[in-house]
Amino acid sequence: MARLSLSPRSWRPSGWALRFRKRPLPTLSQSRQESGTLRWLLGINAVLFVVEMTAGLIAHSTGLIAESLDNFADAAVYGLALYAVGHSVKMQVRAAHLAGVLQLILAVGVLAEVVRRFVFGSEPESLVMMGIAFIALIANTTCLLLISKHREGGAHMKASWIFSANDVVINLGVITAGALVAWTGSNYPDLIIGSIAGIIVLNGARRILALKG
C-alpha cells in the first residue's frame, strides 16, 4: 500500500492559496495605529467641512464649496476606512470602493455647481477664499503627514492617502484662484479652480475604484 508523503517538498500552495497569502492581515498594534490616525483625519475633515461650507456660502466661492464637499466625502471615507481596520482584505476593498463611489457623486455635484454659477453669476470674496484655504492647507497637510506612514497598507488606507493628497492640491488651487480673483476682479478663476477640483476628485474616484487590495 502506497504511503502518503507529508514532506515539505511534496506540497506546493496552489495559485488560489498564493493569492490569499499576498497581504497578511495587520497585527493588533498596526490596527490600533491605523484606527488612531483615521480618527484624527475624520475629526479634522468634519470640522473643515463646516468651516469651509459656511465660508464658501458667505464668500460666494465655488472653490471653497467644492473643498467643503470634498472634506465631507473625506470624512465619510475615513469613517468607512475606520470600520474596515482589522477586517479582511475583501472587506477593506469593498470599503475603498464605496468611498470611490461617494467621491464620484461628489465630483458630479461640484461640476454641476460650477455650471450653475457660470450661468447665474457669482461674486467671490478673494480674501475669505485665501484665508480659509490657507487654514485648510495647514490642516490637510497635517492629515497627509499622519496618513503617509500607512499609504502602503490595505486598500482602505491607500484610498485615504489619495483623498488627503487631493485635498492639499485643491487647497493650493483655491489660494491661487483667490489671488487671481483679487487681481482681475473676475469670478472666472474661482469657476476654473472649482472645475479643476471636480476633475481631481473624479480622477481620485477612478483610482480608488481601480484598487484591488
Image (tube, grey):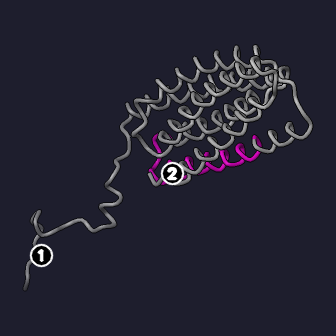
Using the rendered view, name the quadrant where residue 140 is placed. top right
The extreme bottom residue here reads 1
Using the rendered view, name the quadrant where residue 193 is placed. top right
Q: Residue at x 58, y 51 (%)?
A: 206
On screen, residue 207 above or below 169 = below
Residue 209: x, y in percent? 56, 53
Judging by the rendered image, the residue that carries numbered circle 2 is 93
Q: Secondary structure at mark 2?
A: helix
Of circles 2 and 1, the one toward us is: 2
On screen, residue 12 above or below 159 = below
Using the rendered view, name the quadrant where residue 111 is placed. top right
Q: Amino acid at mark 1?
A: Leu
Judged left or right of residue 188, residue 67 is: left
Q: Between 122 and 135, which is closer to the camera in this rendering? A: 122
Judging by the rendered image, the residue that carries numbered circle 1 is 4
Q: Residue at x 30, y 61 (%)?
A: 18
Q: Residues within 10 Å of mark 2 (few under 14, many from 20)?
A: many
Q: Between 20 and 45, which is closer to the camera in this rendering? A: 45
The answer to whether residue 27 is magenta is no
Q: Which residues are magenta?
A: 85-110
Residue 145: x, y in percent? 46, 24
Residue 65: x, y in percent? 76, 30
The answer to whether residue 87 is magenta is yes
